[in-house]
Image (spheres, rainbow, N blue to C red):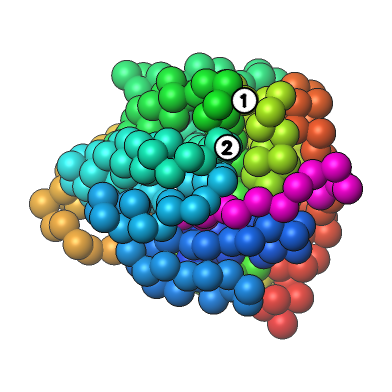
Amino acid sequence: MTMSETPMKVLVTGASGSLGQAVVAGLIAAGHEVRTLQRRSSAVAGAEDFIGTVTDAEDLTTATAGREAVVHLAAKVSMAGALAEFEAVNVGGTAGILAAARAAGVTRFVQVSSPSVAHSGTSIMGAGTLPADPKRARGAYARTKAQGELLALASDTSDFRVVAVRPHLVWGPGDTQLIARIVERARRGRLPLLNSGACLIDTTYRDNAASAIVAALHRADTAHGHAYVVSNGEPRTVAELMDGICRAAGVTPPRWRVPAAVARAAGGAVEALWSMRPGEDEPPMTRFLAEQLSTAHWFDQRRTREALQWSPAVSIDEGLHRLAASYR
């Protein structure tokens, strides 16, 4: 935060996850007073935790009271589950926090979204921020996140400035989503490469994603009304990334390969099976996951970095070094 920026009273939703904790820590380090809203403690020193949910109107009213800004991270993130559950949190929860924030007099709102809102299953190579498309997005998570982003941006005004940030494939030490799943499947010998693993993809080290979200809050006066994809801007092949993550965790990288077409077909069958066993663990493969692992997706970061006056501080190689240190 520069000397010209005034500390704000900020509410962060969904602050108990790895990215949410990093965002809260970054805001506190920048001098802001932070309250969090989620179902369990954020465990971040200096934050005021409010235990609740974005699907409860009373919780939202209480949590937003006296706040000047909101960073909305709370979401249902999964590769499987009932559509109604995704809609309740990712659409209904977003609508609820937007209404509560406006009623509370909030003037800045950062919607944390995902590049999957604009991914239709084909390669994205060097594109900027494509429009969110709920009809073409793949899977319940992506479709409902697209709806949520559109709701947020439609609420943007000169008095209620909304910025949407789409961090791409966030990872880092302590991550229970991407990293933990890759490592566990590799340890059990269940992590294949699709085709040759040669597709180039962008990822975002967690601390970089967090600093971009903080930057979006600071730059809302000029950046509002738009969505921005955030990444490290260092495309690597799927095989190289998998190898680096597995070696950092001390497990054997994937050595066997599966044709992408076979994986997509298998993913569809697995989705059908998982739909009949709600409440169980994450499916080993879905059509969306097969598409993500077998298509290129990397982005032009020039507009994002100019608008947010931001650039990543931690390289992919340094991030892998930190990941390895966390496993040691």
Q: Percent x, y for residue 84?
A: 18, 42
Which residue is painted at 33% across and 64% down in the image? 52
From the viewer's perspective, is residue 321 above or below residue 218? below
User: Crowdedness of circle 1 by 10 Å Cα count: few (<14), some, many (20+)?
Assistant: many
The residue wearing badge 2 is: 108
294 and 50: which is toward the camera: 50
- Identify which amino acid the numbered label 2 is placed on: Arg
CA distance for labels 2 and 1: 9 Å
SS category of the residue bearing label 2: strand
Which residue is painted at 43% across and 44% down in the image? 104
Q: Percent x, y for residue 163?
A: 58, 31
Q: Percent x, y for residue 260?
A: 45, 34
Majority secondary structure of the magenta segment?
Answer: loop
136 and 133: which is toward the camera: 133
Callouts 2 and 1 close, C-beta under 8 Å: yes
Give the tally of numbered discs: 2
Question: Closer to the observer: label 2 or label 1?
Answer: 2
Chain part drawn in magenta: 1-13
295 and 103: which is toward the camera: 103
Is residue 220 among the parts visible in the rendering? yes
User: Crowdedness of circle 2 by 10 Å Cα count: few (<14), some, many (20+)?
Assistant: many
Relative side of 89 to 36, left or right = left
Which residue is painted at 43% across and 53% down in the image? 65
The residue wearing badge 1 is: 224
Q: Quadrant of the C terminus?
A: bottom right
Q: Percent x, y for residue 41?
A: 45, 74
- Identify which amino acid the numbered label 1 is placed on: His
Of the image marks 2 and 1, the number of the one nearer the N terminus: 2
Which residue is painted at 52% across and 21% down in the image? 157
